[in-house]
């Protein structure tokens, strides 16, 4: 058996028999957590950008 064939067979065996896949409900709850965390991070970055922009506008208006 060649190395490539052995690698493919062992990879398939690992994916099918040895990996513990999450259930549908676990997958949904994890997806919701990721979506909420992404929205919070996006909001924080937006607020930081707006604050920095306002500070720079005040600074530039002085000159």
Image (cartoon, rainbow, N blue to C red):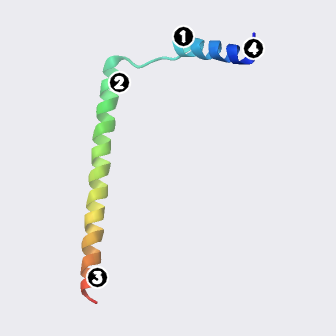
From the viewer's side, name the closer residue of 1 and 44.
Answer: 1
Which residue is found at the position 24% from the left and 85% from the top? 61
Residue topped by disc 2: 27
Q: Disc 3 or 4, which lies upstream in sequence?
A: 4
- Where in the figure is residue 38, as x and y percent of width and height? 32, 44
Residue topped by disc 1: 17
Label 3 with label 4: CB-CB less than 8 Å: no
Residue topped by disc 3: 59
Label 2 with label 3: CB-CB less than 8 Å: no
Label 2, label 1: how far apart the Cα atoms are:
19 Å
Q: Residues within 10 Å of mark 2 (few under 14, many from 20)?
A: few
Which residue is found at the position 25% from the left and 65% from the top? 50
Q: Disc 2 or 1, which lies upstream in sequence?
A: 1
Label 1, label 4: how far apart the Cα atoms are:
22 Å
Residue topped by disc 4: 2
Label 3 with label 1: CB-CB less than 8 Å: no
């Amino acid at each position: 058996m060649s190395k490539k064939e052995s690698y493919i067979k062992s990879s398939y065996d690992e994916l099918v028999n040895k990996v513990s896949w999450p259930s549908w409900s676990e997958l949904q709850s994890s997806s919701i957590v990721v979506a909420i965390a992404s929205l919070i991070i996006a909001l924080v970055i937006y607020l930081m950008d707006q604050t920095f922009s306002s500070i720079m506008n005040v600074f530039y208006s002085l000159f």
